[in-house]
Amino acid sequence: MSKYRSSEWFGKEGKMGFLYRSWMKNQGTPDHMFDGRPVIGICNTWSELTPCNAHFRDLAESVKRGVLEAGGFPVEFPIMSLGETLLKPTAMLFRNLASMDTEESIRGNPIDGVVLLTGCDKTTPSTMMGAASVDIPTIVVPGGPMLNGKFRGKDIGSGTAVWKLTDDLKTNKITLTDYLAAEGCMSRSAGHCMTMGTASTMACMVESLGMCLPGSAATPAVDSRKKVLAHMSGRRIVEMVKEDLKISKVLTRAAFENAIKVNAAIGGSSNFVIHLTAIAGRIGVELTLDDFDRLGSKIPLLLNLMPSGQYLMEDFYYAGGLPVIIDQLRAGLDMETITVTGHGHAENVSTLKDCYNTDVIAPYKQPLLPEAGIAVLKGNLAVNGAVIKPSAASPHLMTHTGRAVVFATIEDYHANVDNPDLDIDETCVMVLQNVGPVGYPGMPEVGNMVLPQKILDKGITDMVRISDGRMSGTAYGTVVLHVSPEAAIGGTLALVQNGDMITLDVPARKLHLEVSDEELERRRAAWVKPAYHTSRGYVSMYQRHVQQADKGADLDFLVGSSGSDVQRDSH
């Protein structure tokens, strides 16, 4: 009888063994596949409603070939797929639901090791969270970025180009015909955003954590070498099962610290903070907002990639990819902590560390910026913390005091932002309330509010913006995000009124509402908690159990692990 957990299904005698094996045979599975070999689950987030992941059925076939070649038994299974571009009201609302789908699909089935096929933003953290709560051998195959967008002789980046082209259209720099023509030019191949948006950030997070084969993060989706990596990942997961190299052996404290430092060097998305924190909560590693500032905020920016720079992920791959960044940071990383290869980063990158384009990947001693990591702000406006991405912000606004212009909801913002009578100028601070985990619900990517038309018409392209929501990793600007506690549960953000003065001081890590404690208490006493959006279903459960942004916005009852053991049979 096999030593693997799948033997509790396929290795049984009598009725239960008959049941478990017989129904699998209707797919043409021969007897010898039940001889005790490792059963490898391929967790597929394919969906045509998730365009970034629409090539995953093909990618899964490459994984299967690798599994079979190594003597394993591959079984592909679907889970809920989260498409950032289409799913309303926000894919973040369903990240935790997809993590539950992943967790229970792995635990409840005869799977000895699992390959996670991930791409679009939330498909990576959700599957990682679910797998971490089961704790079996796990490897990730990032789906890869699209090829560079090409529009009239210039490269354009997914997401980042949307914000810029929309501003250009509003200020008559381009025509509607130009705008529509750019749509097909931006998204011209399979894959996820090719800027350093959240999808690319998550792929780099996976590689820096040691959860995928070296070089996987930047390999374009349509490059034949992506299929090679998928094939080799299929081979490797069989070996990991035989070695009992569980996900908990890879996701150590040292791995999380490595990921924080690498994220700073690549100018990664601010969404990295909320997702890495949630994964840490599942695997049992203590991680706080202060860790991101302490470990990452002084790291130099080495990657010249949109939105913090000029190039795109295809260029990053040709320049050498993430192994080059990891090698350049080696003095500050734990290069020996184990990865899915069974080795540390030192061995993984030993033959992959050459940089082929220093315009794309700057030398460590000549960085693009001396300090680039996520900065964590605190003060009476964000008692538990807020975040800002300095590499995407305007230097002249990093220390700023301005008059608050408050939008109570996203509907209020849309209805009034372009009102010519709106009392606002470029020195003001735009404040958006009730777009946090509970308030929206789901904490959408609306924090990078488009500036009022009257401001854009003056040639102004950035203002200080503050919210309890998130912003796309493809976005840019002096945008304060993830304010905690959020407005919908009575955080100070809920008490901000038009005309209040707000001080942002990023060097001092300060976010302060210039209102007396006495006045704030008076306002708090008069504050009325908004009603929940619904009383039924998943959304109701989410609003009642979601943690705040500084905790990773996981559901409180999902934090931690239930392991892989299942005691009872199904019949």
Image (tube, rainbow, N blue to C red):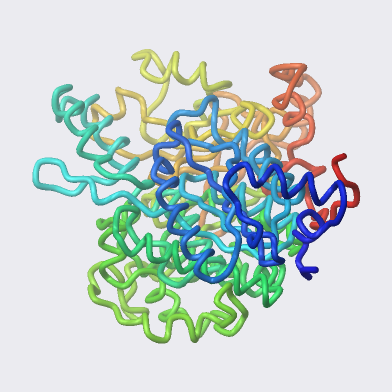
Q: Quadrant of residue 267?
A: bottom left
Q: Compared with residue 539, is residue 330 higher up or lower down, i.e. above or below?
A: below
Q: Farthest residue toward the left?
A: 153
- In screen coordinates, is 245 left or right of 61? right
Report the front residue among 536 and 291: 536
Q: Compared with residue 207, is residue 60 higher up or lower down, i.e. above or below?
A: above
- In screen coordinates, is 356 left or right of 21? left
Q: Residue at x 78, y 35 (%)?
A: 545
Q: Quadrant of residue 311?
A: bottom left
Q: Position of residue 441 (x, y in %)?
A: 64, 27
Q: Quadrant of the C terminus?
A: top right
- In screen coordinates, is 442 left or right of 559? left
Report the front residue among 183 and 445: 183
Q: Residue at x 39, y 52 (%)?
A: 392
Q: Quadrant of the N terminus?
A: bottom right
Report the front residue among 145 and 496: 145
Q: Position of residue 500 (x, y in %)?
A: 57, 30
Q: Residue at x 51, y 80 (%)?
A: 345
Q: How many marks?
A: 0
Q: Position of residue 310 (x, y in %)?
A: 25, 56
Q: Position of residue 58 (x, y in %)?
A: 40, 49
- In screen coordinates, is 270 left or right of 532? left
Q: Farthest residue toward the right?
A: 567
Q: Is residue 274 in sight in this rendering?
A: no
Q: Compared with residue 546, is residue 538 higher up or lower down, i.e. above or below?
A: above
